[in-house]
């Protein structure tokens, strides 16, 4: 036990004396939190639109007005024909073209039926999908209004087919605040970085400087050494999580529905998994660069398959199966459950058990592969 | 059995062998080092010296043969050996980003010294090295010679029975080398067995006995004067060259 204290003391001295390490630990996470929270915005706004209005009627005017009044679209211009509008799309000046056919008003009134054409730049598939969704709901609304107006005019109420109105209620995140959704996930990313990257690099550093040989000829026990080397990062990552939660509450005005301590409980075990991964990587590498590169490789896969940016449910079956082995995905799921939905201990218990199992497996492998002897 | 009061040799190796695949790094070496002896372990680069030391320190499992260090078996009691040996490698192995005092405290701590013992040892050590004014300086600010002397002193902090020095004076100026060997003598006089490898043949003359390794085998073993007589050489340098050329 006393040995661990001596190692801990040494590690903290070294960490706080390392001019390169301090900013990584304290400033980068803050900057990341600020940038990612603002940039990773899934509200699609500012979809630029070219309007080709071949009708120039009162009704077509009303339609375009309605589209820009929604706040999601930005007027770009009114090119003369489709080829010149396509130029705008090619050069990224416009995301979408709305083509209103000639005789729009006439057909609308006479045949009670009309079509408009929408051309969307689908390079950014998500933006295109959401944009077309918005436009469709605006057109639908427009339809209903027209019918209503005419209903009064003609007073033939029986002709109108019954309407089903959908009212949305967004549960758990009533204002669809993407920060409420994204920030908890970003906190997971920060904690993961400290856990996996720094811990692995820290052990490999002893190999690089040759001090590990010196330690290996001392009676220091393998388990003591490992605990002493990893614990500082467990403590730092937990402190960072606490800081992140407080900062997000204060700065982004997030509200936390569930019990914060559940997050710390889960994070405590989750970090043991991450430190185990760092340890495992450090046993297989000789230099900090190697360790960094391998950690980065896994980190990217973990992150992309975590459900942070794209929902796990919309991944192909095989990828969903991989996410079952992705600790980051579990933590993001749990932190969102607790913070947004207010899930309690019994709700997250199955996930706690899964992550504990991960921790046991990873660390057993890591400790077995870490040798004092070669 | 207590090592200190017994007549067990400090190191005893019998046909100690280490193979890496097809390559035999250490080929059935047999030798004995007595208590309090300064034993020089010589050989060209790649002769197998470092592999042999690593086996004796419990860092490397031998392939075959047997050996005891301070009375403990290298196969079955490597952790006991580690408590009783000091080790200083050719690569500087103190923490450059810790101060002199912090390094002493750390190594004292992991060898299980009490806080009072650490404090006492620190005082003695700083006094002996005349490093009192540098106690709070980072080790990386010290000149190489001082670092090596500090590393040697730290490797003795737990009063080991045997200390292994793997090219302790590499890259150090002659004056400091001289001082370093004075420290070695002083330590051996206090009853500590010294097992030292070196490239400097003048240093080999300082040893009580030396062994010379070529291609994994010990080709000569004895006091420097004896070897010189046997091979009809004027200096250890000649002894070394003759032996290496022979094989």
Image (tube, rainbow, N blue to C red):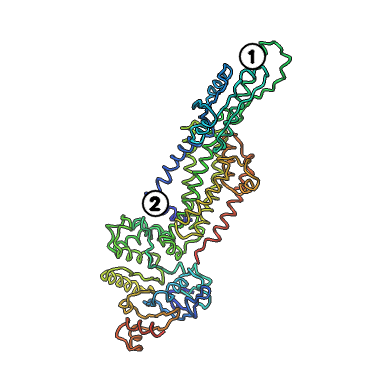
Marks 1/2: CA distance?
76 Å
* Of residues B137 and A370, the one drawn nearer to the viewer in this rendering: A370
Q: Chain of mark 2?
A: A
Vertical arrangement, residue A52 with respect to residue A38, above or below: above
- Tell me the SS state at disc 1: helix
Disc 2 is placed on an element classified as: helix
* Residue B214, image x, y percentages: 42, 80
- Looking at the image, is B126 positioned above or below residue B243? above
Q: Nearer the viewer, residue A327 or A66?
A: A66
Marked residue chain, label 1: A
In this rendering, the count of numbered labels is: 2
Q: What residue sits 49% from the left and 41% below the top? A: A241
Residue at 67 percent of width and 13 percent of height: A151
How many C-alpha atoms fall within 10 Å of the one at disc 1: few (<14), some, or many (≥20)?
Answer: few
A154 over B168 or under it: above or below: above
Disc 1 or disc 2, which is closer to the eye? 1
Give the image location of residue B67, x and y in percent: 49, 76
What residue is disc 1 on?
Answer: A149
Location of mark 2 (residue): A13
Q: Residues within 10 Å of mark 2 (few under 14, many from 20)?
A: some
Name the residue nearer the viewer: A233 or A82.
A82
Image quadrant where residue A365 sits? bottom right
Residue B101 locus on image (x, y percent): 34, 57
């Amino acid at each position: 036990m006393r040995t661990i204290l001596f190692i801990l003391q040494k590690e903290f001295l070294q960490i706080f004396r390392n001019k390169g390490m301090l900013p990584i630990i304290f400033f980068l996470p803050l900057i990341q939190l600020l940038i990612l929270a603002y940039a990773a915005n899934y509200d699609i706004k500012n979809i630029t639109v070219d309007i080709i209005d071949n009708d120039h009627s009162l009704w077509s005017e009303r339609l375009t007005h309605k589209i820009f009044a929604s706040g999601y679209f930005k007027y770009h211009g009114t090119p003369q024909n489709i080829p010149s509008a396509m130029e705008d799309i090619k050069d990224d000046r416009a995301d979408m073209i709305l083509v209103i056919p000639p005789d729009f008003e006439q057909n609308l009134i006479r045949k009670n039926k009309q079509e408009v054409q929408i051309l969307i730049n689908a390079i950014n598939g998500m933006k295109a999908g959401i944009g077309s969704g918005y436009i469709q709901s605006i057109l639908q609304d427009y339809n209903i209004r027209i019918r209503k107006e005419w209903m009064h005019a003609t007073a033939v109420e029986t002709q109108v087919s019954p309407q089903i109105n959908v009212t949305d209620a967004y549960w758990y995140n009533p204002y669809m605040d993407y920060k409420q959704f994204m920030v908890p996930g970003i906190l997971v990313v920060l904690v993961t970085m400290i856990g996996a990257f720094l811990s692995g690099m820290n052990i490999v550093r002893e190999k690089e400087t040759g001090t590990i040989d010196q330690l290996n000829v001392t009676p220091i026990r393998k388990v003591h050494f490992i605990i002493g080397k990893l614990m500082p990062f467990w403590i730092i990552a937990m402190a960072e999580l606490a800081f992140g939660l407080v900062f997000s509450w204060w700065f982004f005005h997030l509200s936390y529905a569930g019990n914060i301590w559940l997050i710390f409980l889960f994070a405590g075990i989750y970090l043991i998994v991450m430190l185990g991964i760092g340890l495992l990587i450090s046993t297989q590498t000789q230099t900090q660069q190697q360790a960094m590169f391998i950690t980065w490789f896994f980190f990217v896969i973990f992150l992309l398959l975590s459900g942070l940016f794209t929902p796990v449910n919309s991944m192909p079956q095989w990828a969903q199966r991989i996410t079952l082995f992705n600790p980051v995905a579990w933590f993001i799921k749990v932190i969102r459950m607790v913070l947004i939905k207010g899930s309690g201990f019994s709700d997250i218990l199955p996930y706690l058990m899964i992550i504990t199992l991960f921790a046991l497996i990873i660390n057993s492998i890591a400790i077995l592969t870490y040798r004092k002897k070669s | 059995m207590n090592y200190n009061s017994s007549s067990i040799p400090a190191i005893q190796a019998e046909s100690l062998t280490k193979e890496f695949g097809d390559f035999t790094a250490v080929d059935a070496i047999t030798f004995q080092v007595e208590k309090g002896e300064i034993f020089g372990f010589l050989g060209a680069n790649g002769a197998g010296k470092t592999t042999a030391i690593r086996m004796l320190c419990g860092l490397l499992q031998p392939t075959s043969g047997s050996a005891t260090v301070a009375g403990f078996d290298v196969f079955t009691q490597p952790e006991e050996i580690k408590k009783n040996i000091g080790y200083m490698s050719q690569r500087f192995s103190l923490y450059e980003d810790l101060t002199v005092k912090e390094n002493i405290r750390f190594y004292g701590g992991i060898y299980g010294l009490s806080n009072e013992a650490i404090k006492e040892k620190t005082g003695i050590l700083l006094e002996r090295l005349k490093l009192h004014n540098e106690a709070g300086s980072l080790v990386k600010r010290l000149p190489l010679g001082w670092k090596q002397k500090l590393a040697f002193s730290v490797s003795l902090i737990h009063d080991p029975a045997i200390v292994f020095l793997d090219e302790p004076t590499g890259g150090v100026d002659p004056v400091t080398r001289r001082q370093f060997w004075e420290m070695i003598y002083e330590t051996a006089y206090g009853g500590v067995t010294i097992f030292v490898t070196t490239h400097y043949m003048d240093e080999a003359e300082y040893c009580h006995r030396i062994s010379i390794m070529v291609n994994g085998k010990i080709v000569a073993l004895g006091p420097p004067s004896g070897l010189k007589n046997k091979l009809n050489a004027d200096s250890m340098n000649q002894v070394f060259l003759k032996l290496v050329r022979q094989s």
